[in-house]
Amino acid sequence: MYETLNIVLGPEVLLSIAVLSLVLYGINLSTLKISAGVICMAGIIIGADYFNLGYVMITNCWVVTCKFIIVIGSISILLMSVGEEIIVRPTQSAPILVLIVALSSLLLVSSINWFSIYLAIELQTLTLFILVALKRDSAYSTEASLKYFVLGAVSSGLFLFGCVLLYGLTGTTSVQEINSNLTADIGKILVTISLLFKLSVVPFHMWAPDVYEGSPTVVTALLATVPKIGVFSILVQVGPVTNVVILCAVLSIVYGAVGALNQTKVKRLLAYSGIGHMGFILFGLGLGSFESIQAGLIYMIIYVIMSICSFSILLSLNLTKDFIIEVRELSRKTPVVAFTLAFIFLSTAGIPPLAGFLSKWLVLLSGVSSGYYLICSIIVVSSVIAGVYYVRVVQIIYFQVENSVLIWQRIFKKERAMELSKSLLIGFTFFIILFLMVSPNCLLQITHDATISLY
């Protein structure tokens, strides 16, 4: 009776009821505020469960930790949406779709069966199809949504084919039973490749730059954070094929570093940057040791925090065409925002002693401990190359001189004050990054407890 009551009060049930209610009766309501409130309530339930105060449906600390990161990311996306007309339009459907993405990610993290994993992934993917195509009058958005739809269908087909092969070989759909019986099989390889599609790692990355560029900036921020947390979490739990993951991880790190060097648009730059970061996370996952999986989780958490901060700043700048050059002389207009953006990009580059350096160092330390000396050397060289385009953005912020075209563009562009929600979001994430740089012990303890629950 107690367990049944706790399951009914779980965050997934709360979000499901909220989504159904908003779809049926949310026409005349502020769906953005209600969605943010529901996500906050779900976060409180998950936080209570972490401290053994709430429901007991989930006993795995890894699952609870990943759920909490998903909730934080979803709240951040909704806070970014304040003042964005493409999201808060008269139909007010976009916040509900963000709520559905959060719900599907929570369900994905909790899944222990191939059927439930597939349904959660499809719910997430179909919702993202709609969000990517929100800008109906944009050719870039149409191209992005079409490419995402086609490649998403291919990924789903590979996942289902892999599940069929696994079921035919083992006679069960339980993830745990299949992991105990199989370490490497063609079915497991297909499932791994399907999940790597969702993480946009090489050579399954071809959709990421175009989809990032064509989507509204808020949707791009959503694609870069919340769905990847859920897929990463379930990829750890299903036990992927190690050789495939390590190969794709190394290729992603190298390609993400080289591919971003000639980019002129911010969102395409962040797309290639995300490919490289996913490579680091997967390298930690592929090593398979306790320390490497913990390092991968730490990297994911820091990456999500830095992405939220950077996208919040980019939204507040109200760029016209999303060119990198548009952040020129930002240090003279808004010195505080310029310093924050430069600090975040340097941290993302892994400059010591910033928070991004901690995550990269832990992953590389795990690789060296496992004997992957050549691969770690390649990763270090790629990280140095990747640092070039991050430093280039900082150089543009502080030292780029305006030309006549940019001056006229600024004259005709309508200036917009920064919303309070974005200011709070930037300040909060920036404080967390500074705190992790000074005292990472709290993060290390949380990720240690989460990782040890997998064994």
Image (cartoon, rainbow, N blue to C red):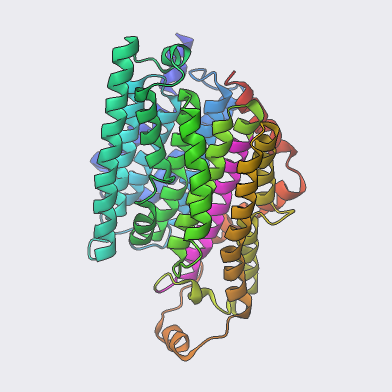
Name the one closer to the observer, 68 or 30: 68
> Can the viewer see residue 43?
no
Residue 316 is inside the magenta segment: yes
- Give x and y (percent) for residue 25: 26, 42
How many callouts does the rendering have? 0
- Determine the residue positioned at 65% across, 62% down: 343
Give the residues in magenta.
295-320
Query: In which quarter of the view is residue 34 placed?
Result: top left
Query: In which quarter of the view is residue 182 placed?
Result: top left
- Determine the residue positioned at 55% across, 33% down: 285
Compared with 317, 228 (above or below) is above
- Quadrant in which the C terminus appears: top right
Query: In which quarter of the view is residue 152 placed?
Result: top left
- Most frequent secondary structure within the magenta stretch: helix
Question: Would residue 216 appear left or right of 60 to someone viewing this image?
Answer: left
- Quadrant in which the N terminus appears: top left
